[in-house]
Image (cartoon, helix red, strand yellow):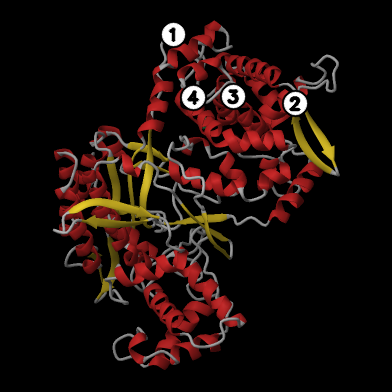
Amino acid sequence: MKKTALIAMTGLSMMFAACSGGSKTEQAANEDSDFVYEVDAFADLEILRYQVSDFDSLTLQQKEMIYYLSQAAIEGRDILFDQNGRYNLAIRRTLEAIYENYKGDKESNDYKEFEVYLKRVWFSNGIHHHYGEEKFLPKFSEEFFAEQVKALPAEKVPVKDGQTVDEFIAMLTPVMFDPNVMAKKVNQAAGVDIILTSANNYYGEGVTQKEAEAFYTKMRVPNDQTPVSYGLNSRLVKEDGQLVEKVWKVGGLYSSAIERIIGWLEKAKAVAENDKQKDVINKLISFYQSGDLKMFDNYAIAWATDTDSRVDFVNGFTETYGDPLGMKASWESIVNFKNMKATKRTELISSNAQWFEDHSPVDTRFKKKEVKGVSAKVITAAQLGGDCYPATPIGINLPNADWIRKEHGSKSVTIENLMEAYDKAAQHSGFNEEFVWSDVELNSLREYGFITNNLHTDLHEILGHGSGQLLPGISSDAMKEHGSTIEETRADLFGLYYIADAKLVELGIIPNKDAYKAEYYKFMMNGLMTQLTRIEPGKNIEEAHMRNRQLIARWVLEKGKGQLAGGTATDVVELKVRDGKTYVVINDYEKLRGLFGELLAEIQRIKSEGDYKAANNIVNAYAVKVDQKLLKEVLDRYKKLNLKPYKGFVNPVYELVKDKDGKITDIKVTYKEGYVEQMMRYSKEFSSLPTYND
Ligand code: ZN
């Protein structure tokens, strides 16, 4: 797995981040309850802001480091626009000029649609959808566009050399308005030339897939144990019929932006925390200067092995999702620092791994005699840039080169303050109000939902997957097609069982003995009902994590029937209908924990003994089939909430505080800047590339 990409974060999917990208977080002690997370919303997008909790716990030197790196993170923005499409900078600059010079009716439909389009171009760093890759079309008219361009002062129109304004309009109009021109940024369809049909700017005009593949095949050295990432930092073009790489480096393509990035990196180097970190920055600068991919690997190794510095960053040509051949990397940056409190918590869980193993409800024969928890670092994002902005990952797992990962290791981190912002925004979405049974559960979710959901993920990742053992002679493939579902079920149950354990209160990592109820309710509501928002009518459940959640929820629902004696309820968990709407109601949390423990013991037995037949039975009985009537109800209720499926962030603003002699005394962080303001400011202050980069 590479970087944990953030996909379609709805209120729902937020509650249950995918297994591998789990969140590890805790509310910051200095959290400001008046902090407003929602900034803007348009099309299918919502803009949030995130809080850089604990910034004040950093030393002045660390803060300064973050300041310089945060500036470097914005300097590459133009590079990404140009990588995403050769007309993107021309379009963005034209739209921004119109935005600033517009004298017409701001209430007109054309203008309103113009604003939406500009906001979308900013969000996508170009004219294609950031997630779907397809071109989105302006909903204002071509005439409106032509009129507005003509109304601009001549020097504001970014024409090509020798081009008239009319020719300029004629060049951009089909690029923006014709659905068949540059229709997809990255085309992965079978049976076509995926380079010729992709609109990105990684290959020059007329370069075919076959030519590009042959070019790089020839470059590779057979049996190279330490292969560089060929093609990573260049555009492949045809010059006089010959293929050549135009390298992104000082003196090459994108030089003016890269030089400014280096300028900030030099300042950062001067305040680095230690020699190792200085060395990391030196190597990165040297790579930017030479374009030498061997140097990039040297940098990646130094970066991966610097685990002591509190401040850390990614800055450069990193992920290759934007190239249909998966070689050319888009520019991105994340500046961050270690969250000491949350990291301490994951280390605490990890160091107690043996206790949890010894006390689990599974048969002694299936327990590990010696178990080790894995521990991942938790970080706070301080600045996002390039391909991490405004849409962002929730975790980072780098470097990408397999041989470096194997020989030198990698860093895997979760970004807690971004997860927190998603969670906070989801609390205002109306989602819980729609699906949660009563105020009791709502309040519990508000107070503990975020902490306990993250804690469940911690237990799942740090302990769950590593727990238990197979009996001698049992193959790890014995579960066949149910392998992932059974494994995820096991890890989830381990977490569910222990999140209600007094040990966690004793260790001080859960606030009190009742907090776990928030996660129990959330889990059951999701597994029985709300995860169905991702299923189409008529379909059943295919994805392993979704199967595992329904397996657990449906199993305990059934086994808990009739287990309570007398009183108002007889079932441990039930689905109740009120005013024609279905809700999950939990009548006995302690008994529910007992059922989770029972199922954990059975799932571990199935896995340890390699009992495929039992696995097949339990998956088919509980995990796959969807109650179509309930599905329709859930989809109808969800649709009415009108939630935006994609989210992104504005950055905070960092300011240097100086004394009367010009000496830096502090760095101030503020959260006042809006989406439009920030985009316009970045386009003015951090935009060094020419409009056309050929
Ligand atoms: Zn998992």
Residue 525: % across, % down: 69, 35
- Mark with earlier residue (1, 3): 1
- In the figure, is residue 329 to the left or right of 463? left
Q: Work out whether residue 136 or residue 453 is closer to the camera in this orientation and state it.
A: 453
Q: Work out whether residue 561 or residue 604 is closer to the camera in this orientation and state it.
A: 561
Work out whether residue 224 can be spotted: no
Q: Residue furthest top?
A: 364
Quarter residue 483 falls in:
top right
| Position of 614 relative to 43 (above/below) | above
Residue 415: % across, % down: 42, 42
Q: Please give the residue where the numbered disc 2 appears in the rendered image.
A: 557
Report the Cα–Cα distance between label 1 and label 2.
Answer: 33 Å
Mark 1 crowdedness (10 Å alpha carbons): few <14, some 14-19, many ≥20: few
Label disc, if present, on residue 369 of the rendered structure = 1
Residue found 72% across the figure and 42% down from its top:
435
Report the Cα–Cα distance between label 1 and label 3.
Answer: 22 Å
Residues at circles 2 and 4 in contact by the CB criterion of under 8 Å:
no
Report the Cα–Cα distance between label 3 and label 4.
Answer: 13 Å
Report the Cα–Cα distance between label 2 and label 3.
Answer: 15 Å
Residue 287: % across, % down: 18, 54
Residues at circles 1 and 3 in contact by the CB criterion of under 8 Å:
no
Of badges 1 and 2, the one in the foreground is 2
| Position of 12 relative to 322 (above/below) | above
Label disc, if present, on residue 465 of the rendered structure = 4
Label 4 secondary element:
loop
Q: Classify mark 4 as within 8 Å of ligand 1 or not, answering yes or no.
A: yes
At label 2, the amino acid type is Leu
Residue found 35% across the figure and 83% down from its top:
158
At label 3, the amino acid type is Leu
Residues at circles 2 and 3 in contact by the CB criterion of under 8 Å:
no
Label disc, if present, on residue 496 of the rendered structure = 3
